[in-house]
Amino acid sequence: MKTSKKLSFPKLENEFLENILRQLVNQHNIFQMFFSKQPSCMFSYLIIHIEKNIDAQELQQNKWVKKVRKRYQIDVYFIYSERLHHRFSLGHPFIEFYCKPSAIIYQNKELENPLIITRDWKKYKKRFNVFQDHFHHDHDLHMSQVQNLISEGSSNSVFTSYARLIEYDLEYLEELYSGNKSALLSLDERINNLIEYIPDIQKYFVRYSHNKFYLTDLFVKVKEATADDEAIYKEEMYKAVGIAEQSLYHLIEERFDELKNQIKKGLFESNEVVCQIDDKPKNRILSVAIETILNSVEVEQIYLYHQITDHEKTTYYLMLIAMGTGNEKLKLITQSLKSKIGEKYNFVLLSHSRYWIQTNLYQHQSFFANIIQGKYLIYSSNEYHPELHWEIPHNPYHADLHFYYKPTKDIALQFFTIVNDSKENYQGLDSLFTLFFMSFCRTYIFIKTYYLPNYLSIQTLWQLCIYADSDMRKYNYLIEQFWTDFFPYLDRHIILHHKLSKLNKEEVDQMNVIVEKLMHELHNLVIEDGLLLSFERD
């Protein structure tokens, strides 16, 4: 056996790893080492062929293995002799390619049973096809079971079967990219581990936390419900789960093709990753807006979904997909934009996390589906953000409309009562007017778009009303003729103040006209158009 002093591994170009390997050779029965250097953006592979399974398992858990992987992008895989030869006999393409003779950097000639691959593509082709066909055969069986359960309407069983099918896909991806499967890990952990090999996989699963995903959480909830003899009715999610599964299936096919081509050629091809996102639109105003937003919050994507120009003033409607961007943060960004760009441009900013959008699609999908489209995307932090798992079919409906319309109507009636009081006691009317206007906007937007906005600034709510129906601009003259700056006035009265009312009859009349006209619009939408059932009408 060679001594550690004489051993050298120049192909590694890594002194830290060389020192560790010398110690391994002295302390364990190492048959062979295979090293395949990959481009810098991909993992290189160091496969260590060792005698015993117990040694392979113990060494795989060493801290230096993780350190080398993280620091040097070298994936170290210990495999014991019996398993290596068995996988070779099955025609495993990972072993066939990464354990080829040209990859050997160490071989102990004193130990018997090394792996020496001498067959060329013509001799290996049959085994490769059998290995690939085995995957397709079992995949088809899993898929047939899912389709049968869908036709039977067994909702819980459908998701349970889909979970098993996705687990099957992940197992093959692990085998083809790392040579080893992680059956003891959760689906979340397996997906996160595979992201390091296949960044594209991020496109297919919406996260609901740093390490967990929406679909895997759905599978867990179904499993818990089944254990409690409860049913989960999420048929509209079948297609979304199916799309995610098919995406994994295509990744497996691509990996098979990639390994097949590499084995046939016997060498690595340079895989240049083209990842260029044009995140700086030509429009100077939008460039400033994006820069301002990015300096304020951590954003995944920005969509410019609408813009209007009225009286030489342009309003841009931007949707931010970001975490932790509340109304106050949006208000600060809007104020910063106004100070940088001036009064000729307005910005209507909405922001939600991807997970919030995903979990609220049952109510708001019609709104978000019209916005989250490639043609509206003006910024993306990277190319791997997942598509939302859209509900198909999706049947939009105005859930709880009664609970939004009735308070708005009651506020209007209360407002009219005070206005028509002969004593002209207008105490609290300004706050009541503000409450009506905000309630009207939220209800109107909900009716027109199926989206119930947060408690945004009053001006943003009104601009969303105009987005929902451009005909609402006909009431802009009332706002422009208001005796004071309309929106700052309303913003001041969102919060109650303990003071005497200074409203006069003329000012109240202007408020009254606005309430009457807007309430008329809402009445026509909700009552005349029959959106509320008869028992909900007053």
Image (cartoon, rainbow, N blue to C red):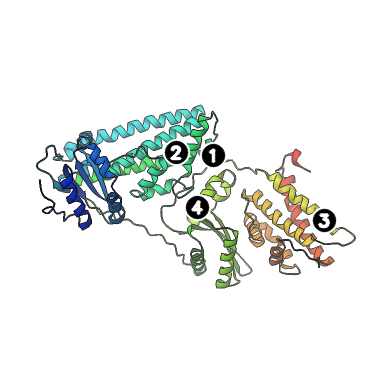
Give the mark, 1 or 4, whose residue is nearer the N terminus. 4
Q: Which residue is mark 3?
A: 416
Residue 276's spot in the image, x, y percent? 38, 59
| Residue 246, picture quadrant | top left
Disc 1 element: loop
Coordinates of residue 151 in the picture (x, y in percent): 49, 28
Q: Residue at x 43, y 36 (%)?
A: 163
Please state the horizontal and vertical placement of residue 340, each as a whole percent of the image.
Answer: 55, 72
Placement of the N terminus among the 4 image quadrants: top left
Taking the spot 45% from the left edge, 65% from the top edge, the residue there is: 280
Kindly report the distance in space between the C-alpha atoms of the residues bearing marks 4 and 3. Answer: 44 Å
Look at mark 4 in the image and give the residue it sits on.
Answer: 373
* Outermost residue to the front: 27
Question: What is the spatial separation of the Cα atoms under label 1 and label 4, in whole angstroms?
Answer: 18 Å
Task: Verify CB contact (< 8 Å) between mark 3 and mark 2.
Answer: no
**CA–CA distance between discs 1 and 3?**
44 Å
Q: Nearer the viewer, mark 2 or mark 1?
A: 2
Q: Residues within 10 Å of mark 4 (few under 14, many from 20)?
A: few
Reading the image, the residue beneath label 1 is 393
Say which label, 2 or 4, has the lower sequence index. Answer: 2
The residue carrying mark 2 is: 242
Distance from disc 3 to disc 2, alpha carbons, whole Å, reads 54 Å
